[in-house]
Image (tube, coloured by chain):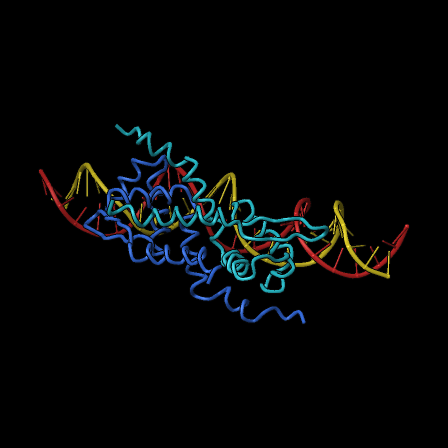
Chain colours: A blue, B cyan, C yellow, D red
Amino acid sequence: MKSKDKFFTAMIHSNDTELFAAMCKALGHPARVMIINYLKKIDRCLCGDIVELLPLAQSTVSQHLKCLKDAGLIKGEVEGPKTCYCLDKKMLEKFTLMVDALNKSSQA
Amino acid sequence: MKSKDKFFTAMIHSNDTELFAAMCKALGHPARVMIINYLKKIDRCLCGDIVELLPLAQSTVSQHLKCLKDAGLIKGEVEGPKTCYCLDKKMLEKFTLMVDALNKSSQA
DNA sequence: ATCGTTTATCGTAAATATACGATGAATGGT
DNA sequence: ACCATTCATCGTATATTTACGATAAACGAT
């Protein structure tokens, strides 16, 4: 019987699996990790602040910010021509819980 | 002064940042998340077991396993023609600690 | 109304990731 | 020695990511 396990074949596209993978993927680039760490430190900032910080063009930074926003890890609030970014702490907490679960459930 | 912040320009390639990003990147695909979850459940398994589980070709699964192994998240032990995979729990714990740090240090 | 500032988006080139089938390497069993 | 099994790797096609410069859009200030 080579019919694959239906449970896992379905699970691979389950919401949790996809969500978790998407968040990990968003954090899977050094520049985006830096952005998260920076936001953790200063709470909120503009795109331009990050452009000053990282050796990347403005358009590239904007792209990375979009990536993090799409994954739900940060929020962006438009303020006139500027956009103020901050961490989405609920999402980060959810991510943390998911990662913790990875470790713990061996000894359930 | 548009000289970028030297600290951050260096940090983006720091060991921790790169390591963390690499681990996240490895977890940034649903199939690989499934593999980790599966290994968490059954402790150790062969490549073929995962091929049965996921709707992917053997070569693709092997590639995903290599990806996880390169990131240090799993270990592979060759046993004759077979390879027995298991989680690298120390690495997973390190990863968990890094993620936890992401959340906590706001209220230091 | 025009200008400067800030950011997102477009177009695009180069690199990387993802998937597959085919093949090769390792070994256990006959 | 030979065959079957298991897995990694190669070759390859396609898709995605990453980076940039150029441009457009949104506003605040003059």
- Image vertical order of residue B101 relative to residue D4, above or below: above
**Could you say which quadrant of the image residue B53 lies in?**
bottom right
Q: Residue sitting at 61 percent across and 68 percent down?
A: A4
Q: Residue sitting at 67 percent across and 48 percent down?
A: B78
- Image vertical order of residue B6 relative to residue D22, above or below: above
Image quarter hosting the N terminus of chain B: top left
Q: Position of residue A92 (x, y in %)?
A: 33, 54
Q: Nearer the viewer, residue A101 or B35?
A: A101
Q: Residue sitting at 38 percent across and 49 percent down?
A: B99
**Could you say which quadrant of the image residue D5 lies in?**
bottom right
Q: Nearer the viewer, residue D15 or B13?
A: B13
Q: Position of residue A36 (x, y in %)?
A: 33, 46
Q: Position of residue A50 (x, y in %)?
A: 30, 40
Image quarter hosting the C terminus of chain B: top left
Q: Nearer the viewer, residue A53 or B100?
A: B100
Number of numbered discs visible in the structure rendering: 0
Q: Position of residue A21 (x, y in %)?
A: 45, 56
Residue B39 in the figure: left or right of residue B96: right
**Furthest residue toward front:** A107
Residue B22 in the figure: left or right of residue D9: left
Residue D29 in the figure: left or right of residue B75: left
Q: Residue sitting at 42 percent across and 58 percent down?
A: A101
